[in-house]
Image (cartoon, rainbow, N blue to C red):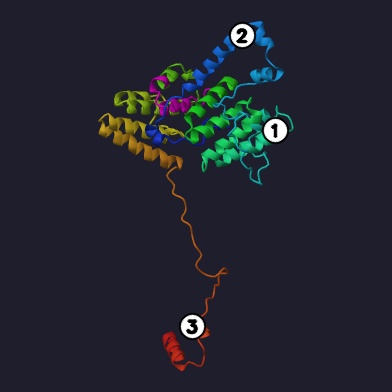
Amino acid sequence: MTDTSANQPKSRDDSSRSNRRGGPRDRDQREQGRGRKGGDDQRGRQGSRGRAARSPRSDEAANKPQHNPADLRSANRPDRGRSPNIDDDVTGKELDRSVQRELGTLDEQNRPWVQKHLVMALRLLEEDAELAFDHALAASRRGGRLGVVREAAGMTAYAAGKYSEALREFRTYRRISGDNAHLPEMVDSERALGRTDKALQLVQEAPLDKLPAISRVELAIVVSGIHLDNDDPQAAVAALEIPQLNPRRGFSYSPRLFSAYAEALQAAGRQDDAQKWANLTARAERALGLDVEPEPEILDLGDEEYDANPPRARDILPPNDSSTQNATKGGEE
């Protein structure tokens, strides 16, 4: 699911990150879990009479797994609807070879299901992230042990603004694959949930030297945004002064990095420097072809077939109109 050339997710809207707010995950679920555990201990301390009095049906109910409302892919969710529909033209073969190899560990019954839902998740990521997330969840119900499936769930959840779910999926992906490429999304999700201290702690614990360049750039942009949220523009400027901030070399990430640096400089009151880096941003976009406007749509207002010899007025007007004929004749003269 990750673009191996740049290791960058397809969708990331940093312009709105500073406005993202949320709340920590509800603690009631954890409290309920501890309450159930305590209840099991009390039942375990009951005498033999209490155990003998239980009917087989009550034992079956006691051993039944408790419903976990936080598990979005759980089959015992009472509110879980049917999996979203798959477009007729989707075969599942549209995925990259590396993804196909990883999905090859699934059996013949589950593999086509997972493949097609992953294709739909990627197809809808830009236009309907909510539905894309539903497709990723559908894929994870049968292939949730694979890193590529959990990565897709994390990417679609992040694009849909479901930051708690994105954190969970990215953590699982990292645990399965050992890949930290989505650390910027994890940090930004903590930021969006209002847990900036935890976000910065996650950055400090990250193996930055093992991250690809694009991930280091994205992480620096997120950290700079956190400092701007905390009204610390000086720290925001310092966070972006990384080796990739090179005005003499342009990469795919350069315009975003230059633009973020210009914004931080402006917040720090360094207007001249901010203008310089804003100009470098435009120059990098031109050099990379990112500022090219789409070609205007051309509408054909004539007939479907182009006539190289358009009819003349005397060929169209009725011949019995002498005044019109005279006017036409005079016009030709």
- Toward the viewer: 283 or 293? 293
Contact check, label 1 and label 3, Cβ < 8 Å: no
Whether the magenta-drawn stretch holds residue 196 is answered as yes
Mark on residue 44? 2
Answer whether residue 4 is visible to the viewer in this image: no
Highlighted magenta segment, given as a residue range: 178-198
Q: Is residue 60 above or below residue 276?
A: above
The residue carrying mark 3 is 313
Residue type, numbered disc 3:
Ala
Mark on residue 111? 1
Q: Single out the mark in the foreground, 1 or 2.
A: 2
Relative placement, left or right, of 48 versus 330 is: right
Looking at the image, is mark 1 or mark 3 earlier in the sequence? Answer: 1
| Disc 1: CA contacts within 10 A as few (<14), some (14-19) or many (>=20) | some
Residue type, numbered disc 1:
Arg
Q: Position of residue 124 (x, y in %)?
A: 55, 41
Q: Single out the mark in the foreground, 3 or 2.
A: 2
Q: Position of residue 5 (x, y in %)?
A: 55, 32
Tell me the distance, in whole angstroms, between the alpha carbons under discs 1 and 3: 68 Å
Tell me the distance, in whole angstroms, between the alpha carbons under discs 1 and 2: 43 Å
SS class, disc 1: helix
| Disc 2: CA contacts within 10 A as few (<14), some (14-19) or many (>=20) | few
Residue 48 falls in image quadrant: top right
Looking at the image, is mark 1 or mark 2 earlier in the sequence? Answer: 2
Quarter of the figure that contains the N terminus: top right
